[in-house]
Amino acid sequence: MSQLPVIVGFGGISPAGRASFHHGYRRLILDQLDSRSRQETLTGLATLMARATSDNGEYITRSGERLSAAQLAEQLAPELLSNTLIRRIHPDWFDVNNVMMNRHAVLQGADSDLVFRIRNRHLPNHIPGNWQVTENGLGHSEVRISGSCEMLLPDSRIAPVQSAGMLPTGFDPGTLYQSRNHPRGLQMSVYAASDALRSVGIDYEQIADRLTPDQIAVFASNSIGQLDDAGFGGLTKFAALGKRTTSKQMPLGYAQMPADFINAYLLGNVGLTGGALGACATFLYNLRNGVEEIRSGRCKFVLVGGSDAPVTPEIIEGFRAMGALAEDKDLLALDQLEQLAEDDYRRACRPFGNNCGFTIGESSQYLVLMADDLAIELGADIHASVADVFVHADGHKKSISAPGIGNYMTLGKAASLIRSMLGEESLQQRSFIQAHGTSTPQNRVTESHVLNETAKAFGISNWHVSAVKAYLGHSQGCAGGDQIAASLGVWRYGYIPGLTTTPEIADDVYQSNLHFPLQHAEVGATGMDSVLINAKGFGGNNASAAIISPQMTEALLERRHGREKMQAWQRRREETRAQAMQYDEDAIKGLARPIYLYDHQVLNGEDLQIDDREIRLPGYAKAIPINIDNPYDDLT
């Protein structure tokens, strides 16, 4: 009997804010929320963005004004909304009007020497020529050129791409724990994984005590590593700039480091670990690994996630050079404008509409998965279940970055599984798609064809299609996590986020069997039984996940465990929800801090008790069995 992997907690941080308790989702559909939910989300953003602090039931703004939660939300709403989601790149990230670069120049001394003053020990790179360097005693070097000389001179330019999906302005995860020069992506990962763990409402130590240490797993990574200056970005450019390479830049740049950080500084995990890579499908690759471990019975508790922080001039320039990003000049041409206003930057990403490229984004998202029997035993809250994740390559390709045929197989298998588990009517009438939806002209054609042909094959006449990148941008390997977080909110608030940045669906989009809502679509909290999460990555990395609603998951589990056990689970769940809500209240007030256990209960070989049957670890309730059965007994 295969265990069903159920989602018992989720959390993260994206341009929409904190993911747990649907806060990020609520930012997307803010105009549809009741007054209390709207107030909570805005208040949470205010403290997250360091616009206010909590004090004895009131909030103190940066100007020293004391306000109630209702007053704070009302007063700061315009500022909070304008500093979230996709927007013009803020100077906290980099100055779009002054992007540094080196310029190649041929310098001539002519009749008199040409003098340049530059910082000491930071001389330009050069091709040998006729030049001399002398110290002037003022902390600078004096460069005199006679004849001619070729050099790379410091220069700057205006960024051709000025929109991005950035975390809420003012939020700095590195200030919330001892970040010690961690790359931004790892800072985000510490915050996001902590948010997910605390959203469960059951202390991790209580969960771990029920399991052997090797029944716990972590699968997390990103698609391109940590490429800011504290990671691989600094490693590759510091030597050329004359800066000192540090001992941290090399290890902290690796793409699997989000999993490593969780093992070392959050969970103390000694069980299974790994970080799968699959370009834009990376999150779903990691989710597939988690699902496989739980279904097989090898693991009972799995933390799955990822973190990408690609809003840097270098990464943006790389994608721009590919012709993949929405450049300012193309947005001007698209809307026939002479100048872009702030609202124009917010509408840079237009999935399945007339568009000109994707918008880069940053995000970190995590899911807490449990085997269904453990969830029922502990009284864990169940937000959904992951039936399976399917992965296929594209076969032979001409361009390695172009889409191919693999996605037809992944989506077809996911749809087929939903039909097998929930029935044909459920698939046809009560499922929806969270599309990859990058906002490139190529994606709108190729992905819509995949979706439309799949809908035809399964007799679906009006498949709802959402694409959360319209709000958040493309967070690369973490994009699947953004899509799942946005989809979970549908089963709490009943709205499928619409393609609100897309004025109209493009003429070349296949849509005979699809429905692309341009406004939020009200379907009801129980109106959808399942969602299919779709991802199409560079290199031929395709993945589709079949996720089942909490209502249908409970119905399936009642068939397995019986009504009596499910009723007992519901009673235990009340305590779980109460503890989880306490965390949410603390987070809204800005009082919660990430879990970060540095130099905590570090073990070495001498601390272990080892025999030929098991290894016992101090601090862990159960031992790790090492008495392994021979799986190849027919060979011996």
Image (spheres, rainbow, N blue to C red):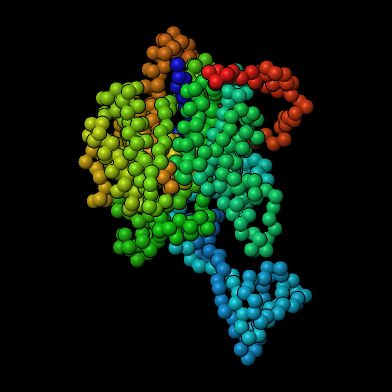
Q: Quadrant of residue 623?
A: top right
Q: Classify residue 440 as left or right of residue 567.
A: left
Q: Do we see residue 484 in this rendering? A: yes
In the depicted view, which residue is nearer to us: 236 or 582? 236
Residue at 78% x, 27% y is 606
- Residue 479: image location, x then y, percent: 45, 42
The image shows residue 470, relative to residue 211, as above or below, that is below
Horizontal placement of 514 versus 203: left or right?
left
Query: Does the image show residue 62?
Result: no
> Could you tell me which residue is drawn at 41 percent across and 26 percent down?
387
| Count of marks placed on residues | 0
Q: Is residue 466 above or below residue 383?
A: below
| Residue depicted at x 41% and y 33% | 390
Residue 624: x, y in percent? 65, 21
Q: Position of residue 452 (x, y in %)?
A: 26, 40
Q: Specify the farthest residue to the top.
A: 564
List x then y, in percent, for residue 303.
54, 31
Determine whether, in the image, residue 392 is placed left or right of residue 581: left
Residue at left offset 67%, top offset 42%: 178
User: Is 212 or 562 nearer to us in this picture?
Assistant: 212
Q: Is the residue 290 above or below the residue 394 in the image?
A: above
Viewport quadrant of the C terminus:
top right
Image quadrant holding the N terminus, namely top left
Residue at the farthest front position: 636
Of 601 and 395, nearer the camera is 395
Side (left or right) of 255 relative to 500: right
| Furthest-bottom residue in this view | 111
